[in-house]
Image: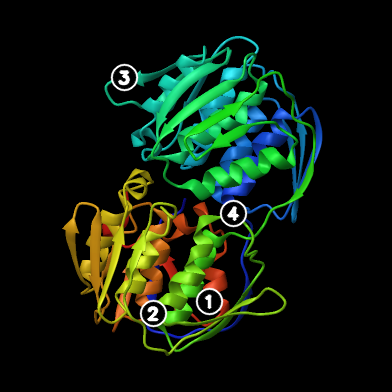
Amino acid sequence: MNPMDCIARQGTLKGEARIPGSKSNTTRAVVFATLAPGRSVIHNPVTSVDCFSTVRVCRQLGAQVQIEDGTWTVDGVGPVLEPPADILDVGNSGTTLYIITATATLLRHGHAVISGDEQIRRRPSGPLVQALRDLGATAFCTRPDVGAAPIVVGPRLAGGSTRLPGVNSQWLTPLLMTGPLSDRGVTVEVDNLQERPYIALTLRWLDRLGIQYTAEEWRHFHVPGGQAYKPFEATIPADWESACFPLVAAAITDSDVVIHGLDLNDPQGDKAIISILQQMGADVQVQPDGGIRVRGGRSLHGIEIDCRDIPDAPPILAVLGTQAEGRTVLYNLAASRLKETDRPRSIYEELLKMGARMHWETEDRLVIERSNLHGAEIDGRHDHRIVMATAVAALVAEGTTRISDAPYAAISFPNFFELMQSLGAPYELVPAAESHRQ
């Protein structure tokens, strides 16, 4: 990515906008289509950097992917894959890392090496690697003491039973996706599953594709083997994770914004932002046509927010908390610490630079109080959600804020800056400051 900074100032928003498709759904759709022999058609995929990483590695596994405006066509290769000729580079996509690691156990022969950027090479993969070994596949990290990518994987996912810690749903989803193609089926016991909406999203895809499975009390999952995926045509719903940023921005400023394309029946966990904003006193209305209207200017008050099922939301929720009277408490943050960065700690350190009143009550409870923010030099930390959250914070901060790593917003929300600018956000992208260049 070209090094660019965002210069951001105080401002309000007005107008209507449509949120792009869901990254989580797009990633799953491309992999499912790869594993289904024949042609699948995916409408409204998000053209994010992470999803292009998924396309790239699926092409290396033999899929043919044609990308057109608003529609991707995938000619899948079926349940047995040929070994790739090069390293499977997932870029910055943790979802792709874990799903492709399991997918590569379906190789006909040989091995695959899965790796990614510096952040990916720090993300914990040991529990998934051990689970794949339990299920008969070849799998190991090249640095066993680190337990992270690069990962070497080979056939064959024979099936059987394994156990996973529940702190990261991204270790479970790959087993549910590949389990139907195993010989004997896959049974997984999960301890204290976090991020349950992401598993609900995966199971919804299995339902759509006619796959048999059982899921008991978010603890016991069984997928019979010997099943097959069929080609499909699907429309990707809008991304609630992306929607959180303009919705919060409107609520904390004197704004009037309508966001289109969202589905309140979608299992994505971040749709909780609607009830969170309403509980805090924001004026949020669901319109008859499905649009979400937020009118700012109302007094907000702090609440306690359980982040177990919304691990991507703590950065923007921390910004929201700075504009609410009293205390806002974010808890159950363990899953959020395993993302591109330790996100609760990252947003805590960056908002402190802007004058936020925040403290740790315990290691798992971050307390935010009403704060008068001011402009600052922000380190985006190569984390799209830190970049976008601090850009929203800048709308209520006195003076000018400069945020590094601005292009990383495209990891999940490719038109974040353009969409926010269309609503009136005073953002300007400029060449990175010399101190930010690497």
- Crowd around label 1: few <14 · some 14–19 · many ≥20 (10 Å): some
- Residues under labels 4 and 2: Cα distance? 30 Å
Please determine whether, in this image, residue 374 is positioned above or below residue 312.
Answer: below
Local SS, label 1: helix
Report the residue at 70% width, 40% height from top.
207
Residue 437 x %, y %: 32, 53
Q: How far across and down, in percent of the image, does residue 42 sit?
A: 75, 47
Quarter-wise, where is residue 433 in the image? bottom left
Residue 57 in view (yes/no) = no
Count the labels in the image: 4
Mark 4, residue position: 267
Q: How far apart, in angstroms, are the residues tagged by discs 4 and 3?
A: 35 Å
Question: Given the image, on which type of amino acid does mark 4 rest?
Answer: Pro
Q: CA distance from mark 1 to mark 4?
A: 29 Å
Q: Is 80 on the left-hand or right-hand side of 114?
A: right
Q: Disc 4 or disc 3, which is closer to the eye?
A: 4
Which amino acid, by three-letter code, is at mark 1? Gln
Label number found at residue 395: 2
Q: Work out which residue is located at the far right of the displayed protein and give it.
A: 38
- Circle 3 residue: 144
Mark 1, residue position: 421
Q: Residues within 10 Å of mark 2 (few under 14, many from 20)?
A: many
